[in-house]
Image (cartoon, rainbow, N blue to C red):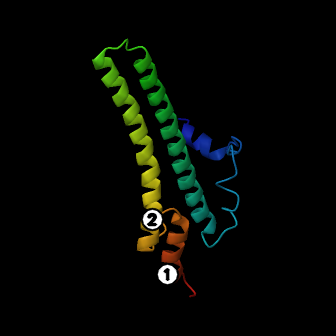
Amino acid sequence: MLNIFSLIAQQPTNIGTFDPPTSAFSERSGTDETGEAALENLESFISNLIGFMTVLASLFFVVYFVLGAFEWITSGGDKGKLEKARNRMLYGVLGMVIIVASYSLLGLLSGIIGLDFLNPAGQIRNLVTPLSPGT
């Protein structure tokens, strides 16, 4: 009886290579023995994630504020609709203030505590360096 798994094992198939869309996370990973590239990749990933979330929050603020302004204009003097539109605009502004304040508060806490939350690779490097062999 012919076993398909033995045929697959006998004839290795080259299915090609995978080229990432960007080399930002893999430039030095093959030659780095100290793990610096992994820490830089982590820092780049977190930085990109925070930037993306900030842009997304800004877009939500603009959309929410414009919708509130549109509701205000089209309310026709109705007190209930005016209140709803005012609250929508207010919540949009409050959301943006919270985003900016949280980023500022994170930087302030980093300075007070002494842990740089906005530079995670540096913090991990400080934790790992004393544990490295040969030190």
Which residue is found at the position 45% from the left and 42% from the top?
Answer: 96
Q: Where does the C terminus fall, quadrant-wise?
A: bottom right
Q: Secondary structure at mark 1?
A: helix
Q: Secondary structure at mark 2?
A: helix
Q: Nearer the viewer, mark 2 or mark 1?
A: 2
Q: Nearer the viewer, residue 27 or 74?
A: 74
Q: Which residue is mark 1?
A: 131
Q: Is residue 84 above or below residue 135?
A: above
The image quadrant that residue 65 belongs to is top left
In this rendering, would 84 be left or right of 119?
left
Within-10-Å neighbours for mark 2: few <14, some 14–19, many 20+: some
Residue type for callout 1? Leu
Relative image position of residue 74 (x, y in whole percent): 42, 13
The image quadrant that residue 31 belongs to is bottom right
Farthest residue toward the bottom? 135
Q: Nearer the viewer, residue 50 or 73?
A: 73
Residue type for callout 2? Leu
The label on residue 108 is 2
Which residue is found at the position 35% from the left and 14% from the top?
Answer: 77
Within-10-Å neighbours for mark 1: few <14, some 14–19, many 20+: few
In this rendering, would 9 be left or right of 110?
right
The CA span between labels 2 and 1 is: 29 Å
Q: Nearer the viewer, residue 118 or 79?
A: 79
Mark toward the start of the polypeptide (2 vs 1): 2
Which residue is found at the position 56% from the left and 35% from the top?
Answer: 2
The label on residue 47 is none
